Image (cartoon, helix red, strand yellow):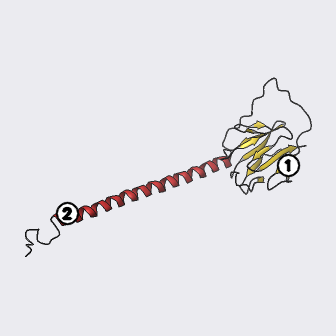
């Protein structure tokens, strides 16, 4: 005959009951750690999304300080014809021409860009082409994949000579007279 008083009366305590309690505590601990891990991952995702939105907003507002590229004294300006058009030479918009009227030209995937690029490698606000004095300068606006003048990556505003290709993703543009 089983003596229930010896085991604490109900049978829930004792060696078997303690083992069951430990088994229930371990999954609860694991569950809490899993919840904390998912919460941390969720916050990392939210912070990453906010960082992307912030960078797009700053690029859109043009808060970057534009510093023109310095010219070496050995470089001589060759004055020829002034650029009058921006021409897309390669890419989905090949053949597109934009008349240069002195206003800055924004390039990117944003709908309000002057040149809207349907290119997977272009950022929302990718680059700006602006007139400074009599020269046109290209400036990368913090794009992910970069802007290239000829074969050099644009890291600061650079003067764009006539006929020199500017590459943004798969799109290539040039200034023409």
- Mark 1 crowd level (few <14, some 14–19, many ≥20, 10 Å Cα): many
Circle on res. 135: none
Residue nearest the observer in this picture, 48 or 168: 168
Q: Quadrant of residue 138?
A: top right
Please name the residue shown 23% across and 65% down the image.
20
Q: Which residue is mark 2?
A: 18
Camera-near label (1 vs 2) is: 2
Please name the residue shown 82% across and 51% down the image.
90
* Vertical placement of residue 1 versus 19, above or below: below
* Vertical placement of residue 35 versus 156, above or below: below
Q: Which residue is mark 1?
A: 87
Q: Residue furthest front?
A: 1
Question: Mark 1: which secondary structure?
Answer: strand
Please name the residue shown 80% across and 53% down the image.
91
Question: Mark 2: which secondary structure?
Answer: helix
Please name the residue shown 81% across and 55% down the image.
93
């Amino acid at each position: 005959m089983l003596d229930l008083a010896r085991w604490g009366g109900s049978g829930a305590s004792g060696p078997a009951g303690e083992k069951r309690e430990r088994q229930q505590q371990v999954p609860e601990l694991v569950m809490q750690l899993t919840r904390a891990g998912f919460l941390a991952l969720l916050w990392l995702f939210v912070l990453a999304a906010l960082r992307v939105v912030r960078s797009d907003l700053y690029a859109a507002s043009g808060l970057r300080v534009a510093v023109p590229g310095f010219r070496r004294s050995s470089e001589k300006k060759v004055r020829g014809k002034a650029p009058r058009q921006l021409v897309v030479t390669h890419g989905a918009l090949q053949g597109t021409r934009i008349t240069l009227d002195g206003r800055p030209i924004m390039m990117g995937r944003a709908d309000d860009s002057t040149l809207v690029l349907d290119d997977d490698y272009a950022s929302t606000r990718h680059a700006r082409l602006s007139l400074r004095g009599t020269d046109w300068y290209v400036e990368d606006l913090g794009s992910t994949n970069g802007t290239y003048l000829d074969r050099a990556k644009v890291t600061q505003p650079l003067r764009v000579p006539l006929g020199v290709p500017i590459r943004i993703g798969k799109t290539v543009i040039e200034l023409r007279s």
